[in-house]
Protein backbone atom coordinates (compact mmCIF):
# COMPACT_ATOMS: atom_id res chain seq x y z
CA UNK A 1 0.00 0.00 0.00
CA UNK A 2 1.19 3.50 -0.73
CA UNK A 3 1.76 5.09 2.67
CA UNK A 4 0.30 8.33 1.36
CA UNK A 5 -3.02 6.70 0.43
CA UNK A 6 -5.89 7.93 2.55
CA UNK A 7 -7.78 5.48 4.69
CA UNK A 8 -11.03 4.33 3.16
CA UNK A 9 -13.73 4.72 5.81
CA UNK A 10 -16.12 1.87 5.11
CA UNK A 11 -19.58 0.72 6.21
CA UNK A 12 -20.85 -2.85 5.77
CA UNK A 13 -24.59 -3.35 5.21
CA UNK A 14 -26.03 -6.88 5.20
CA UNK A 15 -28.96 -8.44 7.03
CA UNK A 16 -27.01 -11.64 7.66
CA UNK A 17 -24.62 -11.48 10.61
CA UNK A 18 -22.36 -14.22 9.22
CA UNK A 19 -22.04 -12.39 5.90
CA UNK A 20 -21.02 -9.18 7.72
CA UNK A 21 -18.44 -11.10 9.77
CA UNK A 22 -16.92 -12.77 6.70
CA UNK A 23 -16.64 -9.49 4.82
CA UNK A 24 -15.24 -7.68 7.87
CA UNK A 25 -12.57 -10.37 8.26
CA UNK A 26 -11.73 -10.22 4.55
CA UNK A 27 -11.43 -6.42 4.62
CA UNK A 28 -8.97 -6.64 7.52
CA UNK A 29 -6.36 -7.74 4.97
CA UNK A 30 -6.38 -4.24 3.43
CA UNK A 31 -4.38 -1.79 5.50
CA UNK A 32 -6.08 1.28 4.08
CA UNK A 33 -9.64 0.04 4.68
CA UNK A 34 -11.20 1.00 8.00
CA UNK A 35 -14.63 -0.45 8.84
CA UNK A 36 -16.35 2.31 10.84
CA UNK A 37 -19.80 0.68 11.16
CA UNK A 38 -21.97 -2.31 10.33
CA UNK A 39 -25.70 -2.28 9.66
CA UNK A 40 -28.19 -5.14 9.62
CA UNK A 41 -31.03 -3.45 7.71
CA UNK A 42 -31.75 -0.68 5.24
CA UNK A 43 -33.27 1.88 7.62
CA UNK A 44 -30.30 1.54 9.97
CA UNK A 45 -27.99 1.97 6.97
CA UNK A 46 -29.65 5.23 5.92
CA UNK A 47 -29.21 6.63 9.44
CA UNK A 48 -25.63 5.44 9.95
CA UNK A 49 -24.39 6.46 6.49
CA UNK A 50 -25.90 9.91 6.99
CA UNK A 51 -24.11 10.24 10.34
CA UNK A 52 -20.75 8.67 9.44
CA UNK A 53 -20.34 9.99 5.85
CA UNK A 54 -18.15 7.01 4.84
CA UNK A 55 -16.01 6.89 1.71
CA UNK A 56 -17.32 3.46 0.73
CA UNK A 57 -20.24 1.16 1.50
CA UNK A 58 -20.42 -2.57 0.86
CA UNK A 59 -24.15 -2.90 0.37
CA UNK A 60 -26.30 -6.02 0.19
CA UNK A 61 -29.21 -5.73 -2.24
CA UNK A 62 -31.88 -8.12 -1.00
CA UNK A 63 -32.85 -7.05 2.53
CA UNK A 64 -36.19 -6.85 4.35
CA UNK A 65 -38.03 -3.50 4.57
CA UNK A 66 -35.55 -1.62 2.35
CA UNK A 67 -33.38 -3.13 -0.36
CA UNK A 68 -29.97 -1.80 -1.33
CA UNK A 69 -31.26 0.38 -4.18
CA UNK A 70 -33.88 1.94 -1.89
CA UNK A 71 -31.17 2.75 0.65
CA UNK A 72 -29.31 4.75 -1.98
CA UNK A 73 -32.52 6.46 -3.03
CA UNK A 74 -33.08 7.78 0.50
CA UNK A 75 -29.57 9.16 0.97
CA UNK A 76 -29.08 12.89 0.37
CA UNK A 77 -25.42 12.41 -0.57
CA UNK A 78 -24.81 8.75 -1.50
CA UNK A 79 -21.25 7.47 -0.99
CA UNK A 80 -19.37 5.18 -3.33
CA UNK A 81 -20.93 1.72 -3.28
CA UNK A 82 -19.87 -1.84 -3.93
CA UNK A 83 -22.93 -4.05 -4.14
CA UNK A 84 -22.52 -7.50 -2.58
CA UNK A 85 -25.23 -10.02 -3.37
CA UNK A 86 -25.91 -13.68 -4.05
CA UNK A 87 -28.07 -12.80 -7.07
CA UNK A 88 -26.73 -11.77 -10.46
CA UNK A 89 -30.07 -10.43 -11.75
CA UNK A 90 -29.28 -6.96 -10.36
CA UNK A 91 -25.98 -6.42 -12.20
CA UNK A 92 -27.32 -4.11 -14.89
CA UNK A 93 -29.23 -1.96 -12.44
CA UNK A 94 -26.12 -1.71 -10.24
CA UNK A 95 -24.24 -0.38 -13.26
CA UNK A 96 -27.03 2.10 -13.99
CA UNK A 97 -26.76 3.63 -10.52
CA UNK A 98 -22.98 4.04 -10.99
CA UNK A 99 -21.83 1.44 -8.48
CA UNK A 100 -18.08 1.24 -7.98
CA UNK A 101 -18.32 -2.53 -8.42
CA UNK A 102 -20.58 -5.54 -8.02
CA UNK A 103 -19.51 -8.62 -6.04
CA UNK A 104 -21.39 -11.85 -6.51
CA UNK A 105 -21.38 -14.11 -3.44
CA UNK A 106 -19.39 -16.18 -2.86
CA UNK A 107 -16.56 -13.96 -4.11
CA UNK A 108 -12.89 -14.93 -4.05
CA UNK A 109 -10.09 -12.82 -2.48
CA UNK A 110 -8.85 -11.65 -5.88
CA UNK A 111 -12.28 -10.37 -6.84
CA UNK A 112 -12.55 -8.45 -3.55
CA UNK A 113 -9.10 -6.97 -4.13
CA UNK A 114 -10.22 -5.77 -7.55
CA UNK A 115 -13.25 -4.09 -5.99
CA UNK A 116 -11.07 -2.35 -3.40
CA UNK A 117 -8.67 -1.20 -6.11
CA UNK A 118 -11.58 0.15 -8.13
CA UNK A 119 -12.81 2.02 -5.04
CA UNK A 120 -9.36 3.56 -4.56
CA UNK A 121 -9.32 4.72 -8.17
CA UNK A 122 -12.76 6.23 -7.76
CA UNK A 123 -11.91 8.03 -4.53
CA UNK A 124 -8.60 9.34 -5.83
CA UNK A 125 -10.09 10.38 -9.17
CA UNK A 126 -7.87 8.09 -11.22
CA UNK A 127 -8.81 6.05 -14.32
CA UNK A 128 -11.51 3.51 -13.65
CA UNK A 129 -12.53 0.17 -15.09
CA UNK A 130 -15.46 0.24 -17.48
CA UNK A 131 -18.20 -1.49 -15.49
CA UNK A 132 -20.40 -1.90 -18.55
CA UNK A 133 -18.96 -5.40 -18.84
CA UNK A 134 -21.26 -6.28 -15.95
CA UNK A 135 -24.31 -5.75 -18.12
CA UNK A 136 -24.01 -9.15 -19.77
CA UNK A 137 -24.76 -10.80 -16.43
CA UNK A 138 -28.10 -9.08 -16.03
CA UNK A 139 -31.27 -11.10 -16.19
CA UNK A 140 -34.56 -9.29 -16.88
CA UNK A 141 -35.15 -7.06 -13.89
CA UNK A 142 -38.07 -7.55 -11.58
CA UNK A 143 -40.83 -4.98 -11.75
CA UNK A 144 -40.95 -2.26 -9.11
CA UNK A 145 -42.94 -3.38 -6.08
CA UNK A 146 -43.09 -0.13 -4.09
CA UNK A 147 -42.25 3.55 -4.29
CA UNK A 148 -40.47 5.40 -1.48
CA UNK A 149 -41.19 9.08 -0.87
CA UNK A 150 -38.93 10.96 1.54
CA UNK A 151 -40.14 14.10 3.31
CA UNK A 152 -37.47 15.22 5.75
CA UNK A 153 -36.92 12.34 8.16
CA UNK A 154 -40.23 10.75 7.22
CA UNK A 155 -40.39 7.98 4.60
CA UNK A 156 -43.69 6.93 3.04
CA UNK A 157 -43.77 3.47 1.47
CA UNK A 158 -46.39 3.16 -1.28
CA UNK A 159 -47.10 -0.39 -2.56
CA UNK A 160 -47.18 -0.13 -6.33
CA UNK A 161 -50.58 -1.84 -6.58
CA UNK A 162 -52.11 1.06 -4.60
CA UNK A 163 -51.03 3.67 -7.16
CA UNK A 164 -53.84 5.07 -9.32
CA UNK A 165 -51.68 7.14 -11.66
CA UNK A 166 -48.43 9.07 -11.76
CA UNK A 167 -48.00 12.43 -13.43
CA UNK A 168 -45.05 14.66 -14.22
CA UNK A 169 -44.99 17.96 -12.32
CA UNK A 170 -42.00 20.07 -13.39
CA UNK A 171 -38.94 18.44 -11.75
CA UNK A 172 -41.13 16.11 -9.69
CA UNK A 173 -43.59 13.31 -10.18
CA UNK A 174 -46.93 13.27 -8.43
CA UNK A 175 -47.86 9.78 -7.20
CA UNK A 176 -51.60 9.52 -6.72
CA UNK A 177 -52.55 6.76 -4.29
CA UNK A 178 -55.03 6.24 -1.47
CA UNK A 179 -56.64 9.61 -2.20
CA UNK A 180 -53.40 11.55 -1.77
CA UNK A 181 -50.73 12.97 -4.05
CA UNK A 182 -47.12 12.35 -3.01
CA UNK A 183 -44.42 14.47 -4.65
CA UNK A 184 -41.05 12.90 -5.41
CA UNK A 185 -38.04 14.38 -7.26
CA UNK A 186 -37.71 11.89 -10.11
CA UNK A 187 -38.12 11.68 -13.88
CA UNK A 188 -41.29 10.04 -15.12
CA UNK A 189 -39.33 8.22 -17.82
CA UNK A 190 -37.07 6.59 -15.23
CA UNK A 191 -40.01 5.33 -13.19
CA UNK A 192 -41.74 4.13 -16.35
CA UNK A 193 -38.79 1.85 -17.12
CA UNK A 194 -39.18 0.13 -13.73
CA UNK A 195 -42.90 -0.61 -13.89
CA UNK A 196 -44.67 -3.72 -15.18
CA UNK A 197 -45.66 -2.66 -18.70
CA UNK A 198 -48.64 -5.04 -18.67
CA UNK A 199 -50.26 -3.19 -15.76
CA UNK A 200 -48.94 0.36 -16.00
CA UNK A 201 -49.14 2.22 -19.28
CA UNK A 202 -47.93 5.65 -20.28
CA UNK A 203 -51.12 7.14 -21.69
CA UNK A 204 -49.55 10.56 -22.18
CA UNK A 205 -46.03 11.95 -22.13
CA UNK A 206 -46.79 13.30 -18.65
CA UNK A 207 -48.90 10.48 -17.19
CA UNK A 208 -48.66 6.77 -16.33
CA UNK A 209 -51.90 4.95 -15.55
CA UNK A 210 -52.59 1.82 -13.51
CA UNK A 211 -54.94 0.14 -15.99
CA UNK A 212 -56.77 -1.59 -13.13
CA UNK A 213 -58.17 1.84 -12.24
CA UNK A 214 -59.56 2.43 -15.73
CA UNK A 215 -63.34 2.13 -16.13
CA UNK A 216 -63.82 3.48 -19.65
CA UNK A 217 -62.38 5.61 -22.42
CA UNK A 218 -64.32 8.65 -23.60
CA UNK A 219 -64.02 10.44 -26.93
CA UNK A 220 -63.33 14.07 -26.03
CA UNK A 221 -62.85 15.55 -29.49
CA UNK A 222 -61.62 14.39 -32.86
CA UNK A 223 -58.65 12.05 -32.13
CA UNK A 224 -58.76 13.14 -28.48
CA UNK A 225 -59.70 10.72 -25.71
CA UNK A 226 -59.94 10.69 -21.94
CA UNK A 227 -59.29 7.87 -19.50
CA UNK A 228 -62.03 7.76 -16.85
CA UNK A 229 -60.92 6.25 -13.55
CA UNK A 230 -63.02 4.50 -10.90
CA UNK A 231 -63.16 7.66 -8.79
CA UNK A 232 -64.33 9.74 -11.75
CA UNK A 233 -60.97 11.36 -12.42
CA UNK A 234 -60.37 12.03 -16.13
CA UNK A 235 -56.91 11.93 -17.71
CA UNK A 236 -55.94 12.88 -21.27
CA UNK A 237 -54.78 10.12 -23.61
CA UNK A 238 -52.36 10.87 -26.44
CA UNK A 239 -52.45 9.03 -29.80
CA UNK A 240 -49.43 6.93 -28.88
CA UNK A 241 -50.88 6.35 -25.42
CA UNK A 242 -54.13 5.12 -26.92
CA UNK A 243 -52.20 2.72 -29.15
CA UNK A 244 -50.42 1.32 -26.10
CA UNK A 245 -53.70 1.03 -24.19
CA UNK A 246 -55.42 -0.89 -26.98
CA UNK A 247 -52.72 -3.56 -26.85
CA UNK A 248 -53.53 -4.21 -23.19
CA UNK A 249 -57.32 -4.00 -23.25
Image (tube, rainbow, N blue to C red):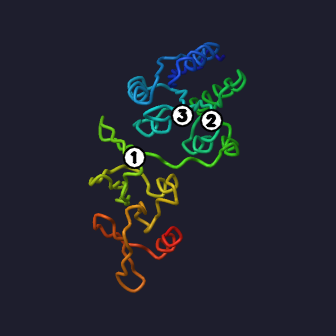
Q: Residue at x 66, y 16 (%)?
A: 1
Q: Residue at x 31, y 50 (%)?
A: 182
Q: For mark 3, what is the residue? A: 61
- Residue 204: give x, y in percent of width and height: 43, 68
- Residue 50: give x, y in percent of width and height: 39, 28
Disc 2 packing (10 Å; few <14; some 14–19; many ≥20):
some
Indicate the quadrant where residue 121 lies.
top right
Q: Is residue 2 above or below residue 42?
A: above
Q: Is residue 31 above or below residue 86?
A: above
Q: Secondary structure at mark 3?
A: loop
**Which disc number belongs to residue 39?**
none
Indicate the quadrant where residue 4 lies.
top right
Left or right: 95 in relation to 198: right
Q: Residue at x 50, y 35 (%)?
A: 68
**Which disc number belongs to residue 159?**
1
**Which disc number belongs to residue 87?**
2
- Residue 176: give x, y in percent of width and height: 33, 55
Measured in 3D between alpha carbons, the distance from the residue under mark 2 to the one under mark 1, in whole angstroms, is 23 Å
First reached walking from the N terminus: tag 1 or tag 3:
3
The answer to whether mark 3 and mark 2 are in CB contact below 8 A is yes
**Count of numbered labels shown in the rendering:** 3
Amino acid sequence: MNQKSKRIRTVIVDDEELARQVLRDDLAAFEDVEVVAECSNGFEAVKVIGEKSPDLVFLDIQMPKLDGFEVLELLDDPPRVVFVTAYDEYALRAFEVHAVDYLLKPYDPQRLAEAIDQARRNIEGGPQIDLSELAWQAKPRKSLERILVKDGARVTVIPIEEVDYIEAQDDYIGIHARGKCHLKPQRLSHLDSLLDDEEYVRIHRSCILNIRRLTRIELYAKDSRLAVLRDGKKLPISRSGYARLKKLL
